[in-house]
Structures are given as C-alpha cells and as structure tokens.
Image: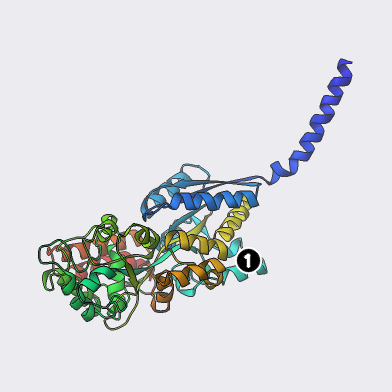
C-alpha cells in the first residue's frame, strides 16, 4: 500500500514537473531602471503599463525601479551592472547614448530586432526623436519619454493685460513686449520665466536654435559655444532680466517653476511638455500652450528619455526586453502615455489612434510639442556628454548671475570642451 502510494505520488510529481518545465525554461525576469524627474503620477502610469504587459506575457516578470532624475538613474543603473546585479534595460537621457557606447554598456537594437517586423518597427518613430538615438547608422536608443520645450501662458492674465489669448508671442520681440505688459510693478507677477537650473543647457539649446545656431556637430565631436549667434542668445537671456525687467535676475529653479506658474507668479514659462497634463489639472486659470518664439528661426531641441538595452543580458533576456520596449511604444500605449502625462506620442501612428485623436480635438495644446518637431533639433549630445554639459551649464549660470559676461563664459566653456573632444575627432 505504502509502495503503491509512493509510486503514484512520484508519477504525479513527474507529470507536474513535465507540464511546468516549458514555463520554467521560458520564464524571464527583467529589471528596468526608470527616471521620475517631471511632476505627475508617472509611477502609477508605468506600473499600469507594466501590469498590462505581464498579463499579455505571463512568462516575463518586470521589476521597475524608480531611481530619481535622469542622472540619478544612469548612475544607479550602471552601478548595479558593475556590482553584478541583473539590469537588462532602462529609460535614460536620450543624450546619454555616446557615454553608454563608450562604456560598452549597451547594444544597438539591430542586434536584437532582426525580423522584418522588428525592422519596420524601428523605422516607425518620428525622425526628429531619433536624432539622438541613431549613431553611426545604428539605433542605440528608442524614444519613449520624449518632449520638446513649449511655452505655457496664462490666458486669463493675457486678457487682463489687453493681449489676445489666442495669439501668443511668435517672436522674441513680441515676447518681450507681451512680458512687459504682464509684469506687475509690485513684484507679484513676472511676465516670463525660463528655468536655468537642472536643464539650463536644454533651454539654452532652444535659444541658440531660435537664433539660427546649434550647439554641437552631428557626430558629437565638436561644440559651437563661442559662435556669435550662440553668444547673442545668452546675452538675450541675460537681458530679459537686467535690461527688460520681465524676469527675475539670477537663476530660476527648474523644480519649482511649474508651481510658480500655477500660482500665478509668472504669466509665461518655458518648460517641458511632460508637465502638460499636470499643469492643465492644477492651474486655476485658462492655460495656453504655444511653440517657442523665434528670432532668426523657430525651434526647440528635443528632450527626454530613450529605452536602452544593456549588454550584460542573456539572449532570452534581450528578447524579452525588446518585447517590453515594443509593447510600451505601441501606438495605443504611446497614446495612453501622452494623454496621461503630456509627453509626445513617439510615432505618427500614435496620433492616429482614436484615443489621441479625440484628446487632441478636445485639447489642441496636446499637439503643440508634436507639431514643433518639424523645426526641432537634437539635444546637446557629445562624447564626454556629462562633462561637456556641465561646462555649458556653469557658463550659463555665471552669465545669468553676472559673474561673467556671456562672451567670456562661453569662450571659456568652448576652450575646455575642445580639450575634452579633440581625441574623438
């Protein structure tokens, strides 16, 4: 009796093991580091998308680690890799590609996306969003949390100041004129604020583009910080405070500017479109959104984060990571993400989904960042990106605080950037 029960139990166990084996063999755990640097309930949105992915792919488990801002996320993800912890993918700055390639930390998507369907997917994104992701003919980053800088403005304040709320300033000259009318002499409201901490180089990239110049070469080996149009752009930024008196002197905090705008402390602000949904929910006034005003030309650098695939992953993990990235960038998911956050849908197909079509029809500002892609430029990205970016950030802040003239600050930054980048030419 005992023997028969034992044999029966063994038989049942063997059957159970054989039925479970295919799942165990194909089961994959993924760890994804994700930045949360812009306001809004981003973690809830990402968690929901991950949960939907796991339902569709029950053999893949995704552990999303929210690691702070982009710089924090890069540092933590790379530290985990160096420490032998499993990390297969991450959303990091689109401009991190050069550094990640130099560190031999990532693989191009073409190494994993090999089918005809995969290749079609690689070509489905807005070209403007791929400018920072395609290097030497290979795709190192896939756009996801992407943005351009837009101008938010208080339509109610525009009406009170006698300005047309449906025709925001389209040029630098018009912006200054409007800002003067919107600035209150008692200091309770400024006409304009452009943030100069956190992502000063990004805002400055917009000003340079609007003055007809880019900040770097397409191959990431040269910067153009001391070119006359670039110096003029920084002088203009400084003059908004010290000459035109429409913006506070010194630096303006990135992290608190959205709240300052919502509280009516500034009538216009330049900020990421990633704040759009939260600003719309929080502002007690009618919010307008416009493309950035132009001087010699319109435009904004793109910004935000791309998906990257880390090199230290098994073939099965890479395949699963690709499956996750493809899921997250499907038109329906991209539309959901855009509506929930204000970030752009990353492909034309996203804006053809019924959900995003209806949303844009109801709230036209949701299409401003996308439309601005037609005049966008790549975000500042070079070899030695972190060091070069810091050189420029420091130069901008020294000029805005009056410690140096714009020309002196940018010449010094250019000289140092040349020394860093010369070996890569």
On screen, residue 182 versus residue 164, left or right, reads left
On screen, residue 177 versus residue 83, left or right, reads left
* Picture coordinates of residue 133, whole percent (x, y): 47, 67
* Picture coordinates of residue 172, whole percent (x, y): 23, 79
Between residues 91 and 269, which one lies in front from this camera angle?
269
Residue 407 in view? no
Residue 421 in view? yes
On screen, residue 178 versus residue 383, left or right, reads left
Residue lying at 32% horizontally and 76% vertically, measured from the top left: 214
Residue lying at 12% horizontally and 65% vertically, measured from the top left: 402
Q: Residue furthest top?
A: 1
> Relative to 85, is 174 above or below?
below
> Relative to 231, is 145 above or below?
above
Residue named by callout 1: 118
Residue lying at 48% horizontally and 56% vertically, measured from the top left: 104
| Image quadrant where one finds the N terminus | top right
* Picture coordinates of residue 335, whole percent (x, y): 52, 64
Q: Quadrant of residue 177?
A: bottom left
Tell me the element at label 1.
Answer: helix
Q: What is the crowding at mark 1: few (fewer than 14 residues within 10 Å), some, or many (at least 20)? A: some
Q: Quadrant of residue 396?
A: bottom left
Residue lying at 56% horizontally and 72% vertically, measured from the top left: 123
> Relative to 172, is 414 above or below?
above
User: Which coloring applies here?
Assistant: rainbow
Looking at the image, how many numbered discs can be counted on the residues? 1
Between residues 66 and 368, which one lies in front from this camera angle?
368
On screen, residue 374 versus residue 119, left or right, reads left
* Picture coordinates of residue 229, whole percent (x, y): 24, 79
| Image quadrant where one finds the C terminus | bottom left
């Amino acid at each position: 009796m005992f023997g028969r029960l034992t044999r029966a139990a063994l038989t049942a166990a063997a059957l159970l093991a054989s039925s479970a084996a295919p799942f165990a063999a194909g089961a994959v755990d993924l760890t994804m580091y994700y930045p949360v640097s812009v306001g809004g309930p981003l973690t809830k949105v990402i968690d929901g998308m991950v949960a939907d992915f796991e339902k569709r792919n029950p053999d893949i488990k995704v552990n999303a680690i929210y690691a702070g801002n982009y710089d924090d996320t890069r540092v933590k993800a790379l530290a985990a890799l160096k420490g032998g912890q499993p990390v297969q993918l991450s959303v990091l700055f689109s401009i991190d590609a050069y550094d990640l390639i130099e560190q031999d930390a990532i693989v191009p998507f073409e190494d994993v996306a090999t089918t005809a369907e995969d290749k079609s997917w690689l070509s489905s994104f807005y070209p403007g969003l791929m400018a920072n992701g395609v290097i030497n003919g290979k795709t190192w980053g896939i756009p996801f949390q992407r943005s351009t800088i837009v101008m938010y403005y208080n339509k109610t304040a525009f009406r009170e100041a006698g300005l047309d709320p449906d025709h925001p300033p389209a040029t630098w000259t018009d912006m200054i004129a409007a800002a003067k009318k919107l600035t209150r002499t008692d200091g309770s409201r400024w006409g304009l604020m452009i943030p100069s901490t956190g992502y000063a180089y990004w805002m400055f990239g917009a000003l340079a583009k609007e003055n007809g110049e880019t900040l770097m070469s397409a191959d990431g080996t040269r910067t153009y910080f001391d070119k006359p149009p670039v110096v003029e752009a920084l002088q203009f930024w400084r003059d908004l405070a010290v000459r035109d008196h429409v913006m506070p002197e010194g630096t303006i905090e990135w992290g608190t500017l959205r709240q300052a705008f919502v509280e009516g402390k500034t009538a216009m602000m330049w900020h990421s479109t990633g704040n759009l949904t939260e600003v719309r929910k929080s502002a007690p006034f009618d919010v307008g959104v416009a493309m950035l005003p132009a001087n010699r030309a319109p435009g904004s650098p793109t910004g935000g984060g791309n998906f990257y695939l880390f090199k230290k992953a098994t073939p099965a993990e890479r395949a699963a990571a690709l499956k996750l990235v493809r899921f997250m960038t499907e038109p329906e998911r991209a539309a959901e993400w855009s509506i929930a956050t204000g970030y752009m849908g990353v492909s034309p197909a996203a804006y053809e989904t019924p959900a995003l079509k209806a949303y844009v029809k109801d709230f036209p500002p949701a299409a401003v960042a996308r439309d601005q892609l037609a005049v966008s430029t790549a975000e500042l990205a070079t070899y030695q990106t972190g060091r070069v970016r810091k050189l420029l950030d420091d130069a901008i802040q020294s000029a805005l605080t009056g410690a140096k003239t714009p020309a002196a600050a940018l010449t010094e930054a250019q000289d140092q950037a040349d020394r860093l980048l010369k070996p890569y030419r």
